[in-house]
Amino acid sequence: MNANRNADNRRVLFRLLAVAGLMFGFGYAMVPMYQKFCEITGINNLLNPDDALRNTQVDTSRKVTVEFDANLHGLPWSFKPGQTSVSVHPGELVHVVYRVSNTRNHPVTGQAIPSYGPQLAAAHFKKLECFCFARQTLGPGESREMPVVFSIDPALPKEVNTITLSYTFFEVAGAVAEPAPQQRRPGA
Amino acid sequence: MEATHAHGAGHAHGDGHSHHPKGVMRWITTTNHKDIGTMYLWFSFAMFMVGGAMALIIRAELFQPGLQYVEPEFFNQMITLHGLIMVFGAIMPAFVGFANWMIPMMIGAPDMAFARMNNWSFWLLPPAGILLTASMFVPGGAAGTGWTLYPPLSIQMGIGMDMAIFAVHILGMSSIMGSINIVTTILNLRAPGMPLMRMPMFCWTWLITGFLLIAVMPVLAGAVTMILTDRHFGTSFFSAAGGGDPVLFQHIFWFFGHPEVYIIALPAFGVVSHVIPAFARKPIFGYTSMVYAIASIALISFIVWAHHMYVVGMPVAGQLYFMYATILIAVPTGVKVFNWVATMWRGSMTFETPMLFALGFLFLFTIGGFTGLVLSNTAIDVQLQDTYYVVAHFHYVMVAGALFSAFAAVYYWLPKWTGHMYDETLGQWHFWLSIISFNIAFFPQHFLGLAGMPRRIPDYALQFVDFNQVSTIGAFGFGLSQLLFLYVVLKAIRGGVKAAAKPWEGATGLEWTVPSPAPYHTFEEPPVLTEAKGHA
């Protein structure tokens, strides 16, 4: 009776422990699930090009001012837009550049994250090419001109006359030495 | 349920008593469910005092606009520690303590299923409590993120954050072990003749709470582990710099956090489902519907988490889904409230302290439930997110819900634990002081929130002064009333009118068949249940 009961208890114990272990894994499984969900639904689509506007006439009846802003978050770089603002027609394909240079004598990797003001402009701002779609690694003292190609959806609400596109470059921690390993791995 | 013979007491004193270590070693090495239950309850009361003192620092600072007593950083640390300590240190251990004390006696078991693990799950708590409180004194201070530990702030803070993370890990382990123990005890150790659908309601609520804890505490452990590796090991789950997403943390956290609300509330429901029938002298109305209501609340709690994050930039379809799913919870909760009221209908009611606290629970928890319904509406929540309306809402649910129910439980079972009746007059004073000062403290916060006062900010605009002063006065009254509670409990431990085995006329259940105080060992032979005629 007692031995039976102990065996029963142990069986329940192991099952419940297995549930706890599985749920710990589930917490981690939520990471790829979340990414997949965002990818499918198109939420939080920061690192992929937007679909090009199709069958769109350039709306020459109005002009929108696009202002450019550049910020650094803990990176030893200088980072500036090539132009402070441009005036564009909605639907027009626009090409601008940002200039970035590494002021240190070792390679540094960064990732740019865009944001928009006003926020509702984000849905109408279509980037076809952007340096923010990938990590950027700059060698020691390297300077670079980086392109952004975009167009503005003519469906942009009429009251929006100015859009600010702001990038913030974040240092990718631990990636500083990343480009090197293939060539020279110490002791290999 | 009626046991044919209350012999649990008879031979209980016989063996296993003499060779117990004495003094402090008795408590460190004990595997007795009653000892461990007692330790859980005292630990939770100590943490309740610590967390309460922090709340009073917060309210003192908010008595006037501008900065008076503390720096904003310290204010944020108080907010964080108050939340973490009250949730994980005070409320949860209190109900685990009730479960330890009462569940074996309710189901006629000699002890918990894993007595040694029980000891371990308690002794994990003090280190966690010390880690949390001591983190105030390390460089940079304690975590100042709020109890939700949202990144990016939680990725940036100092060593106090690491201590909070480890404390959460330890508390999580303790809860998981405690729950496994309780679930196994309920599933395997019931007295012969007690099917699941006839067991006392407190056991049902704990069975389901146990499953909830086992399912969601590991998810929280995973979430804080991800923060830890983001902080120190170069991963970027949440750090935007490496392509992570802070919003992902909110999803994982609230996948834990919403069931956590019911982990706190369900055992409270269980206590109330014992106290109201006992003092209305009627069996609980709608036992089966109560069980199904608990189970459906638990299931729905897994699919509503994002109603805590309507403003993160969720698509409208998502907001609508989470809104309707959340509103759905009102249905089983309404069933429970209806059943409690129907239990009292035409009952022979008396209003001793446990009943007063149970009625206070019923009244205030329903108010908290209604403000919850208001907040579940996306369109309204966008206005009220992070305002004092939310603070008022969850204090009505947590304090007036869980804490009042815990007070009801202490007064209801105190004669069984100590063998003495508590001082009824002082108990009723404790109730009236608590419920009045609680409402003075928290009701005005609804108005502050509706007027737009943000939470977690030590300063506020001038128009909020009056209500904040009222609220602070109420909070100090509420805090001081709890010293009276301590006095009443100590007085009952030290002496008083001898309690009968069943001091409450309308109480039912096996725990009332053993003498008061309950002997150290009970039900070493399972009781024989003649006819399972009623549920507790």
Image: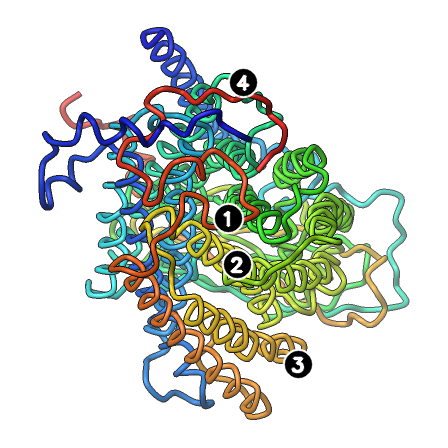
Q: Is residue B532 above or below residue A95?
A: above
Disc 2 marks a residue whose amino acid type is: Met
Q: Name the residue at 58% across, 69% down.
A: B392
Disc 3 vs disc 2: which is toward the camera? 2
| Secondary structure category for the residue under label 3 | loop
Q: Give the chain letter at badge 3.
A: B
Q: Give the chain letter at badge 2.
A: B
Q: Nearer the viewer, residue B483 or B135?
A: B483
Disc 3 vs disc 1: which is toward the camera? 1
Q: Which residue is mark 2?
A: B398
Q: Which residue is mark 4?
A: B193
Image mark for residue B451: 3
**B24 relative position to B427: left or right:** left
Q: Quadrant of residue B44?
A: bottom left
Question: CB under 8 Å between callouts 1 and 2?
Answer: yes
Q: Are the numbered discs 2 and 4 placed on the same chain, yes or no?
A: yes
Mark 3 or mark 1: name the one nearer the start of the chain.
1
Q: Are the numbered discs 3 and 1 placed on the same chain, yes or no?
A: yes
Question: CB under 8 Å between callouts 4 and 3?
Answer: no
Q: Which residue is mark 1?
A: B264
Q: Is residue A110 visible?
A: no
Disc 2 from disc 4: Cα separation: 36 Å
Other residues around mark 1 within 10 Å, as few (<14) / some (14–19) / many (≥20): many
Q: Give the chain letter at badge 1.
A: B
Q: Quadrant of residue B181?
A: top left
